Image: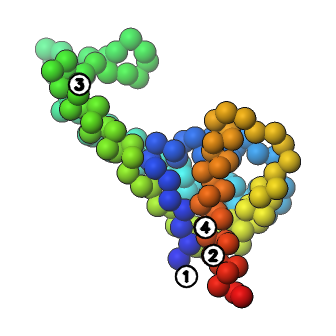
Amino acid sequence: MTKTLTFKNSELSVVGNFLGTLSLKNKASRGRTKLIKLISAKNDEYVEERKETLEPYIKKDEAGNSVEGDTPGSVVLIEEKTGEANAAIKEIDEESAVIDFTEYSEKMKALYEAIIDYTSELSNQDAMAYDLLMDQLEMVFETEKDGEK
C-alpha cells in the first residue's frame, strides 16, 4: 500500500524547517531525516516552477537581464502584469505536493510515535507546522490501525 503525505507547496519549507528543530533519537531521527530529504526535493520542484511561472512577468533591462529588486534574490515585476503574476504564484502556492514515503514507512511510523506526544512547548509557526504534519501522519497511521482491527 502506498503511503503519502500531502501539503500545499507553500507549506513545504515550514514543515521541513520545523522538523529540523525537533529533538529526536534513533529510528525517529532517521525518519525525520528521510522526510526532510523528501520535502526538500518537492520544495526544489516548487521553487523551480515558481521561477518558470514568474519569468514572463519579470521586468528586463536593455540587455535582456532580469531587473533585481531591493532585497537580494528578488526581481522587479512588470507593473501592468503584477496582478496576473500574483494570481499565477498564488495558484502554484496552493497546489498539492504529494510525498510518497512508502519505502521509509517504518521510520515514518517511529517519527509519528515519537512526536505524537511531543513534550516540548511549541508556539507560533512551529505549532502550526506540528499541526499540519500530525494531521497528515494521523491520516496514514490511524487509518492503517483501523484497517488492522
| Neighbourhood count class around disc 2 (C-alpha, 10 Å): few under 14, some 14–19, many 20 upward | few
Query: Marks 4 and 3: in contact by CB < 8 Å?
Result: no
Query: Marks 4 and 2: in contact by CB < 8 Å?
Result: yes
Q: Which of the two labelled residues, at mark 4 and mark 1, occupies the earlier sequence position? A: 1
Q: Which mark is residue 35?
A: none
Would you say 89 lies left or right of 71 here? left
Which residue is found at the position 32% from the left and 21% from the top? 75
Q: What residue is pinned by disc 3? A: 82
Where residue 55 sits, quadrant-wise, is top left
Which residue is found at the position 67% from the left and 81% from the top? 146
The percent coordinates of residue 50 (x first, y second) are 33, 39
Q: Which of the two labelled residues, at mark 3 and mark 2, occupies the earlier sequence position? A: 3
Question: Mark 4 to mark 1: distance in Å?
Answer: 14 Å
Q: What residue is pinned by disc 2? A: 143
Q: What residue is pinned by disc 4? A: 139
Which residue is found at the position 72% from the left and 35% from the top? 123
Please state, as top left, top right, bottom left or bottom right, where the N terminus lies in the image: bottom right
Above or below: residue 146 compared with residue 46: below
Q: What residue is pinned by disc 1? A: 1
In the rendered structure, which amino acid carries the disc numbered 4?
Met
The outermost residue toward the top is: 70
Which residue is found at the position 58% from the left and 41% from the top? 14
In the rendered structure, which amino acid carries the disc numbered 3?
Thr
Above or below: residue 93 compared with residue 98: above
Where residue 102 sits, quadrant-wise, is bottom right
Q: Secondary structure at mark 2?
A: helix
Question: Mark 1 to mark 3: distance in Å?
Answer: 44 Å
> In this rendering, which labeled residue sits more in front, label 4 or label 1?
4
Question: Mark 3 to mark 4: distance in Å?
Answer: 38 Å
